[in-house]
């Protein structure tokens, strides 16, 4: 069920989510829901602000880091998305972040010239990503 249906207005949903993250700052899903609701209304700066506050409360959260990367990439801020990926690898260095990071760098680098960087970053992600990179390079 969509949250907006339950709360009847974006304002009441926003108020509930704001109180929720205040009282439960380690609940990553609440931060993500709040940022997504802001983004869905077209308020990208407010979504960024929510994620920035989420970083303070959950600095090592892979979900929050990856949500921030997605927000920036899907709003045309590819350089910012790439910088966030690099920071995520130092702060929240999980298998999922490494895999996501390597794949996003391939996608964010339209000419695929960063394949050497991807190869260095792909530690632990297996050969599928390596093959994926070579396929992209051969068709670009």
Image (spheres, grey):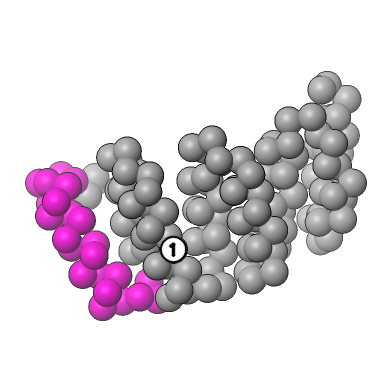
Quadrant for the C terminus in the image: top right
Task: Using a 10 Å C-alpha cutoff, classify the residue at mark 1 as few (fewer than 14 neighbours), some (14 to 19) or many (20 or more).
Answer: some
Q: Is residue 108 above or below residue 32?
A: above
Q: Residue at x 63, y 44 (%)?
A: 79
In the image: residue 132, left or right of residue 39: right
Residue furthest top as drawn: 139
* Mark 1 element type: helix
Q: Is residue 12 magenta?
A: yes
Q: Which residue is mark 1?
A: 52
Q: Is residue 67 above or below residue 21?
A: above
The x and y percentages for residue 5 are 15, 44
In the image: residue 1, left or right of residue 116: left
Q: Residue at x 50, y 53 (%)?
A: 67
Query: Is residue 29 at all visible to an observer of this figure?
Result: no
The x and y percentages for residue 21 are 30, 70
Q: Is residue 19 magenta?
A: yes
Q: Residue at x 49, y 61 (%)?
A: 64
Magenta residues, start to end: 4-29
Answer with the quarter of the image where residue 111 lies.
top right
Q: Residue at x 42, y 60 (%)?
A: 51
| Number of numbered markers | 1
The x and y percentages for residue 101 are 69, 52
* In-front residue for pair 44/16: 44
Examine the residues drawn in magenta and state their main secondary structure: helix
The x and y percentages for residue 29 are 38, 63
Query: Is residue 134 at all visible to an observer of this figure?
Result: yes
């Amino acid at each position: 069920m969509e949250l907006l249906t339950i709360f009847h207005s974006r304002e009441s949903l926003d108020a509930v989510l704001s109180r929720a993250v205040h009282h439960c700052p380690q609940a990553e899903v609440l931060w993500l829901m709040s940022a997504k609701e802001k983004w869905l209304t077209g308020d990208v700066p407010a979504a960024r602000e929510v994620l920035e506050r989420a970083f303070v409360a959950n600095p090592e959260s892979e979900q929050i880091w990856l949500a921030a990367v997605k927000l920036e990439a899907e709003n045309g801020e590819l350089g910012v998305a790439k910088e966030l990926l690099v920071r995520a690898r130092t702060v929240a260095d999980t298998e999922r972040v490494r895999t996501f990071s390597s794949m996003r760098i391939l996608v964010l680098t339209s000419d695929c010239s960063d394949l050497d960087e991807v190869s260095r970053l792909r530690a632990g992600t297996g050969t599928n990503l390596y093959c994926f990179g070579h396929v992209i390079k051969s068709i670009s």
